[in-house]
Image: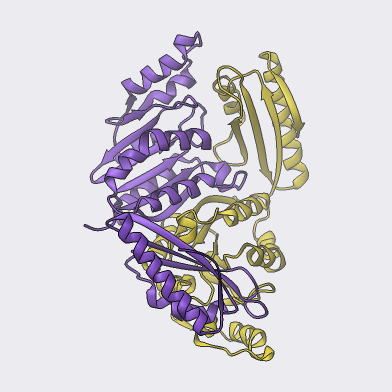
Chain colours: A yellow, B purple
Amino acid sequence: MGEKKAWIFTLGTEVVRGLVVNTNAAFLGRRLSQLGIAVSGVITLVDDRKLIANLLRYVLRDHEPDLIVMTGGLGPTYDDITLESIAEALEKPLTINREAFEMLKEKFVSRGYELTKERLKMAYMPEGAVAISNPVGTAPGAVIRYGKTVIVCLPGVPREMEEMWVKHVENVIKEFGVLYTAEGSFTVVGVPEAVLAPILRKFYEPSGSTYIKSHPRGYELSNPIVEVYVSVTSTSIELAKSLAKEVCDKIAEEVVRLGGSIRHYGC
Amino acid sequence: MGEKKAWIFTLGTEVVRGLVVNTNAAFLGRRLSQLGIAVSGVITLVDDRKLIANLLRYVLRDHEPDLIVMTGGLGPTYDDITLESIAEALEKPLTINREAFEMLKEKFVSRGYELTKERLKMAYMPEGAVAISNPVGTAPGAVIRYGKTVIVCLPGVPREMEEMWVKHVENVIKEFGVLYTAEGSFTVVGVPEAVLAPILRKFYEPSGSTYIKSHPRGYELSNPIVEVYVSVTSTSIELAKSLAKEVCDKIAEEVVRLGGSIRHYGC
């Protein structure tokens, strides 16, 4: 049984233009990786229906992921076009989703607010979508199946996205990805990154189950300090942890043999 | 003369996995937008040569941008594969770049360090590339032309990327994009986002020269606070500024007519 593959789409012109830093991508990348799901990439796009539909079709066709998580573009404003764009890409009609409609009625009408055209817009979803309730804000999320791919749409506001992820999405994803990831890290002092590279390479597996990354923190020549990050994905968390520790220990041994030293050993 | 179009590629498994937050994308998105260049999207990918080459070919073929800015993957380690991936996508040979070689010799040999295989790797670039010197770190950048598209490759370490952007890249880009962008923003209190939406829509131009975005900051129903951001791109900075101010003033007038109030008016 191979690793499950995922892509993340973070939608919004304000993110592309750098008006906000994309913390949603980091949150989702980290959570999915910890669940043993291999994220191939993150795609951030301006609010343009044709562009979003085009990229979605490309990823579905050329990469066939098991999972796509999308954030942003579910709200009441004219540039909130995620569900329209998905409907276009999948060639599904955009219809009023009954569950989403009930969620909005509960949120607005029952509290004496009008369900304006802009608010009702949030109930339009591609046919067959399952609505996800939003405990923090107003826009419901959606889960859409397309062939073997599950597409999960969440709002772009981080506090809404994170709450919905933890409450409604993560449990589904956990059953979905049945692999576990363990992480370790430490700092190497006194060995330049270019000298460390062939050592790390010995333990790196391009297949993806052992991932090793070095981050230079000092200056390559005058004061080499390199942070090393190791993660191992396996079929049980115990196995993943012991494999990660083994890799860390072996690298550390070779560093000491080269005259370097290890700090902040957390493996 | 239309707006120039750009894409950003930020490469690195550590970014996809959320081990670092993608501040490079925000920096580049903001700088390019301020130069009047329309960024369509940001693509973040794990260190996989075939995957990077595939996405690059897709963007070149389906979107034909004027500019692609890439960060990451230029260093000495085995997972630094940006230039290899570009060579593969463009079907160009990867050869030792003379300028890059001289930069590395200057950096290492002249200071008594060995030019190891890993360090020399940083001089291999797609044929025809122009090397960009790195005043902070060791890996040179590269500029590659492909048809009408200019591809600029910068390191992933933010302090190196930003320094090279300011010193070597921005001036070239300035001549390239001959439009100017002015920005304005203010806070609307007392009008829910869904009520504000049709007002903003009147001034928004999908062509892209006037961009308006609302960010809900309070709670839609009980305490509506919405930040409004306006940007206008035009042929001179003065024209862009006066058009942006005009749009802000008109929105503010309508907000007040609806019983709302304006705070932090910066237009």
Give residue B102's position: percent from left, percent from top: 36, 17
Residue at image point 50% right, 50% down: B26
Give residue B145's position: percent from left, percent from top: 27, 39
Give residue B9's position: percent from left, percent from top: 43, 46
Question: Total number of numbered labels?
Answer: 0
Instruction: Check the image and report above or below for A110 versus B117.
Output: below
| Viewer-proximal residue among A240 and B54 | B54
Q: Quadrant of residue A52?
A: bottom left
Q: Can I make out residue A90 in this image? A: no
* Residue furthest out toward the top: B112
Residue A24 is left or right of residue B129, and the answer is right
Q: Quadrant of residue A105?
A: bottom right
Residue A27 is left or right of residue B72, and the answer is right
Instruction: Check the image and report above or below for A22 versus B132.
Output: below
Residue A92 is left or right of residue A202, and the answer is left
* Residue furthest out toward the left: B1
Quadrant location, the C terminus of chain A: top right
| Viewer-proximal residue among A132 and A117 | A117
| Viewer-proximal residue among B205 and A23 | B205
Q: Can I make out residue A266 in this image? A: yes
Give residue A149's position: percent from left, percent from top: 52, 64
| Viewer-proximal residue among B151 and A214 | B151
